[in-house]
Image (tube, helix red, strand yellow):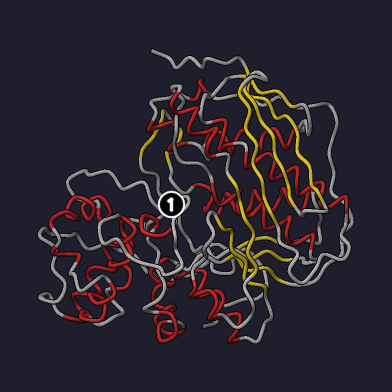
């Protein structure tokens, strides 16, 4: 039976920025009856002197589009209404991508079809970019291997940057205080109470393209403080689908794909400014190569204080001052595989509380999903590609011996060259000569 939303339309109500409190507000509703408000609070810290109002307006509009997915998913409607920021033809296609491929996991896990998703209609107007002048880098940080590697490589090249982190609670990972430059934090306040009430009333829940939301918020920060470059830390990942809805690939991390990075960058150049640059300088590296680079450049400094485990650290409201590994989730299993070829077995086990994750019975099915065994579906998480992880496993066994790393099932060998540089942007700095 096709899904029937209890509402006729999801409404993009309004957005604004209050310069007195440095707060951006984004307002949405269903039929003007059930309302949601999201806030982004940007502490002045060094002080906001002056900024380009037109560029800020365009960045707010982009964030208005991307953050909407957090609320639309509660009662997805086929109709959307824009009371502000009506998209032109290209923007309508951009939104359609976000609401299909960006929400593909949400659709799959809630048994929805593409026909259940809103269709975005374009206005007759054509929106344009504005002139903007700025200088300086914002580097997105999480406390995971990719972002800490990016920060380390920037520092090795003596490139000044602002490490930047979105808080969902009062804390932030203290490992980020160890970076060369002072950490800049902003506070995202998702309308949790309204979403909880929506779920209590039968609303749906699921994964959203969070990377696009984070990048959109970082652009607001960049313009307020006169920066012109936003660097993410994303390798060659996300292209391998987990499942399909008809011909639509179901992908947990669509917003992290090379296609999505190019699309986002095109939006910025077309609708915000040609002089603002967004992307990942790690895009050309495989996840396995990033793990190797991390062990060479950042392990001594961060090896026992970083974490890529979402479950233990990054759920809404979690205290993540000290990063941890839960040792039970797909991200922990994925990280164990990626670092196994490059870290001594006993040291790797110490990172995960002294446990050999390969020998952990509760993770057997997870490893099967990661490694493409017995048709177990790849977990919905930001993880490496199947053949890449198969290669990591056999590299570890060849280097440290079969007894050191042993799963309770056979793993096929893959033809995967983790050293190959994948398609990537032309952003500076360039790290591909490492």
- Find residue 64 and report its horizontal and vertical position in percent: 70, 40
Q: Is residue 401 left or right of residue 288?
A: left
Between 400 and 22, the one nearer to me in the picture: 22
Image: 328 above or below 183 = above
Q: Is residue 285 visible?
A: no
> Does residue 124 appear in the picture of this structure?
yes
Q: Is residue 174 left or right of residue 58?
A: left
Q: Name the residue at 55% across, 67% down.
A: 141
167 and 52: which is toward the camera: 167
Compared across the picture, whether 15 is left or right of 369 comes to right
Q: Position of residue 344 (x, y in %)?
A: 25, 82
Q: Residues within 10 Å of mark 1 (few under 14, many from 20)?
A: few
Residue at x-position 14% and y-position 79%: 401
How many numbered callouts? 1
Q: Is 191 drawn above or below residue 113 in the view shown? A: below
- Which of the 4 quarters of the picture holds residue 186? bottom right
Choose between 167 and 336: the one closer to the eye: 167
Quarter location, residue 367: bottom left
Secondary structure beneath dot 1 equals: loop
The quadrant in which residue 8 appears is top right
Q: Is residue 187 above or below residue 208?
A: below
Query: Whole-percent x and y of residue 150?
Result: 55, 74
Q: Which residue is mark 1?
A: 315
**Quadrant containing the N terminus in the rendered view:** top left
């Amino acid at each position: 039976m096709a899904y029937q939303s209890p509402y006729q339309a999801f409404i993009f109500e309004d957005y604004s920025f209050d310069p007195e409190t440095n707060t951006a507000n984004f307002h949405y509703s269903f039929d003007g009856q059930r309302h949601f408000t999201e806030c982004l609070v940007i502490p002045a810290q060094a002080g906001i002197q002056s900024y380009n109002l037109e560029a800020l307006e365009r960045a707010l509009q982009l964030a208005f589009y991307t953050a909407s997915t957090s609320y639309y998913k509660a009662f997805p409607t086929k109709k959307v209404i824009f009371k502000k920021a009506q998209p032109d033809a290209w923007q309508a296609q951009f939104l359609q991508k976000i609401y299909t491929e960006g929400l593909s996991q949400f659709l799959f896990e809630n048994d929805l079809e593409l026909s259940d998703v809103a269709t975005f209609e374009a206005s007759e107007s054509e929106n344009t970019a504005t002139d903007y002048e700025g200088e300086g880098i914002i580097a997105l940080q999480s406390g995971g291997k990719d972002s800490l590697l990016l920060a380390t490589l920037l520092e090795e090249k003596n490139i000044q940057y602002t490490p930047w982190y979105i808080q969902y609670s009062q804390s932030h990972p203290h490992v980020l205080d160890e970076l060369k430059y002072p950490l800049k934090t902003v506070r995202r306040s998702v309308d949790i109470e309204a979403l909880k009430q929506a779920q209590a009333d039968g609303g749906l829940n699921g994964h959203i393209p969070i990377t696009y939301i984070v990048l959109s918020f970082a652009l607001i920060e960049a313009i307020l403080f006169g920066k012109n470059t936003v660097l993410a830390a994303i390798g060659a990942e996300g292209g391998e689908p987990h499942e399909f809805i008809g011909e639509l690939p179901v992908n947990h991390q669509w917003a992290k794909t090379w296609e999505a990075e190019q699309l986002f960058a095109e939006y910025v150049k077309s609708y915000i400014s040609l002089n603002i640059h967004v992307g990942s300088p790690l895009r050309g590296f495989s996840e396995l190569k990033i793990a190797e680079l991390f062990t060479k450049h950042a392990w001594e400094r961060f090896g026992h204080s970083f974490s890529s485990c979402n479950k233990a650290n990054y759920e809404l409201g979690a205290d993540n001052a000290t990063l941890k590994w839960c040792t039970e989730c797909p991200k922990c299993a994925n990280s164990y595989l990626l670092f196994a070829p490059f870290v001594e077995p006993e040291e790797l086990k110490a990172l995960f509380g002294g446990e050999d994750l390969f020998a952990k019975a509760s993770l057997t099915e997870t490893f099967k999903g990661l490694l493409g065994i017995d048709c177990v579906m790849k977990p919905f998480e930001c993880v490496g590609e199947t053949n890449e992880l198969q290669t990591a496993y056999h590299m570890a066994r060849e280097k440290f011996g079969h007894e050191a790393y042993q799963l309770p099932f056979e793993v096929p060998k893959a033809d995967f060259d983790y050293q190959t540089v994948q398609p990537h942007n032309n952003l500076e700095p360039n790290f591909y000569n490492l």
